[in-house]
Image (tube, rainbow, N blue to C red):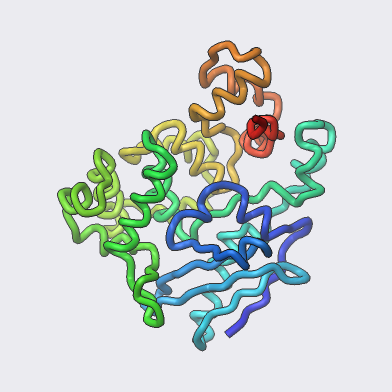
Amino acid sequence: MKLELSARHPFSLSAVVKSHGWIRLAPFGQDEQKRQTGGLTYVDQLNSGRVVDMDIREAADGVSVAVGQELTATEAAEVAEKVRWMLQLDLDLSTFHILARKEPKLAHVEATARGRLLRSPTLFEDTVKTILTTNTSWAGTIRMVEGFVSQFGAPLAANPARRAFPVPEKVAATDEETLRSSVRLGYRAPYVLELARSVASGALDLEALKTTDLPTTELRKRFLAIKGVGPYAAANLLMLLGRYNFIPVDSWGIKMVSHEWYGGEPVGASEVEAAFERWGEWQGLAYWFWDWSYADEG
């Protein structure tokens, strides 16, 4: 079954896929052919319980989504809604692009259709993945997410080695020791377990935060109240929700700002925030898509 979904232009699937590292975290996938065309795959467990593999490729007006089996009308609508969310197909970035035209370090953004961030279908998945990026190497994050999905995700019938991201109820039924020893989440194990149990029980409605009209500062407080979510993680989650008022400052960002404005002298998070403060509600995007290309030199 194939679905055709339109996108607000300018749009580039390749730009979304390359927007950050989520494409390397299961159950996202990208083989060599899709890497060349900017496409991606995603294994998802639908509300009906069926596990499907979405093959997403760029199309004339947006993207095409191929699913290797027939879907009911309800399932097809769910797939379309999830892909729209993951790729931010309806996002209006015109205001940001107008501002970016005036800054040489952001002049590339509109021309290359950048500004969208790849995100997961659920905020539960994005929150777990964000927690698993803290205080570890990127290789460590990839390993933890892969183990988590392999241990608790529902398998794809056509290829059981490929699994969907675990639903909160499945994770909630396990214990901290399993998350520590089998999945090797380390100190993050109790945080992920408590999050899953809070969501599964209904005590925390994470998905409602995707469309809440709460002020960004209040939404940030909600994220910071989740164990395992600090200022960096909260800012990252806000960015994924289209709230760009805060910057997800990490060691790499500090290093880049140090070289960009301080001649390599030591700086901290406050200097990173000050460097982009003038961008106001767009500061997170300005930071994310700033031309740091010299970082790859040498």
In the image, is residue 190 above or below residue 263? below
Please report the residue visible at 70 percent of the width from the left and 25 percent of the height from the top. 278
Q: Nearer the viewer, residue 241 or 25?
A: 25
In the rendered view, tell whether residue 187 sits above or below residue 148.
Answer: above
Figure quadrant of the C terminus: top right
Coordinates of residue 52 in the picture (x, y in percent): 45, 76
Task: State the residue at coordinates (26%, 64%).
Answer: 170
| Corner quadrant of residue 99 | top right
For residue 160, side relative to residue 242 (left or right):
left
Which quadrant is home to the N terminus?
bottom right
| Whether residue 48 is visible | no
Q: Horizontal and vertical percent for residue 31?
A: 55, 65
Which picture quadrant has residue 165? bottom left
Quarter-of-image position of residue 136: top left
Residue 164 sits above or below residue 22 on the image: below
Q: Camera-side residue: 215 or 37?
A: 37
Q: In this view, does 176 lie to the left or right of 90?
A: left
Where's residue 190, x and y in %?
23, 44
**What is the x, y in percent for residue 110?**
79, 46
Q: Quick check: can you spot residue 15?
A: yes
Q: Which residue is drawn at 57% across and 73% down?
A: 55
